[in-house]
Amino acid sequence: YLITVNGADTPQVYDGATMVAAVNTVGGVASTLLLNRVCSFNQRLYFAEKDTLSIWYLGVGLYQGALTEFDIGPLCTKGGKITKIATWTRDNAAAGANEMLVIVTDQGEVFVYIGDYPGGVWNLSAKFSVGEPVAGVDSVVKLGPDCILIGEDGFQPMAHYLQLGQS
């Protein structure tokens, strides 16, 4: 399946032959959320709600259904909105690679989560500030296992910030 969002319409699902509106609910009621980012992480789809600091996610293996909110607003000291959600793979130096979920705000705050999902084993692995990312959907680009952040600081690998912070 291909899942598309644009922040103005109902998420769309393409099954290889037809494009139809996804049927998502919040609290058992049809969702009217405006979702503008989508990312697959640990067999779940994560969506960013337009102009907010809320992430919504589905159950394992689902492309539509009951959405659950994960609000990062209380952690954001600069406010703003989510501009990108992505996955990032890091070598853990012991037993292989860790897959992490990265959330970037338009104010340059980056949150890195590791674990299954927010309702289960879930930990904030890192939080740091970077230069404000470029506007648009491609402020973070996957390059191999790393993520490249494109913003006021230029093109910087996420690993650079994790080790040194913004300089």
Image (spheres, rainbow, N blue to C red):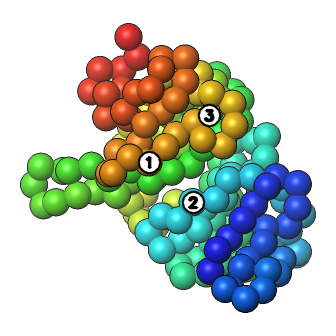
Position of residue 63 in the picture relative to residue 166 (left or right): right
* Residue for point 16% across, 60% down: 96
User: As drawn, which residue projects farthest toward the top?
Assistant: 167
Examine the rendered structure and indicate whether residue 167 appears above or below residue 46. above
Q: Earlier in the sequence, mark 1 or mark 3?
A: 3
Examine the rendered structure and indicate whether residue 119 appears above or below residue 59. above
**Mark 1 surroundings within 10 Å by alpha-carbon count, few (fewer than 14), some (14 through 19), many (20 or more):** some
User: As drawn, which residue projects farthest toward the bottom?
Assistant: 17
Residue type pointed to by label 2: Cys
Mark nearest the camera among 1 and 2 is: 1
Q: Are marks 2 and 3 in contact (CB under 8 Å)?
A: no
Mark nearest the camera among 2 and 3 is: 2
Q: Are marks 1 and 3 in contact (CB under 8 Å)?
A: no
Residue type pointed to by label 1: Lys
Which percent across, then down, holds residue 106? 65, 29
Examine the rendered structure and indicate whether residue 96 appears above or below residue 123. below
Q: What residue is disc 3 on?
A: 105
Q: Are marks 1 and 2 in contact (CB under 8 Å)?
A: no
Q: Secondary structure at mark 3?
A: strand
The image quadrant of residue 132 is: top right
Which percent across, then down, holds residue 55? 65, 53
Mark nearest the camera among 1 and 3 is: 1
Q: What residue is disc 1 on?
A: 142
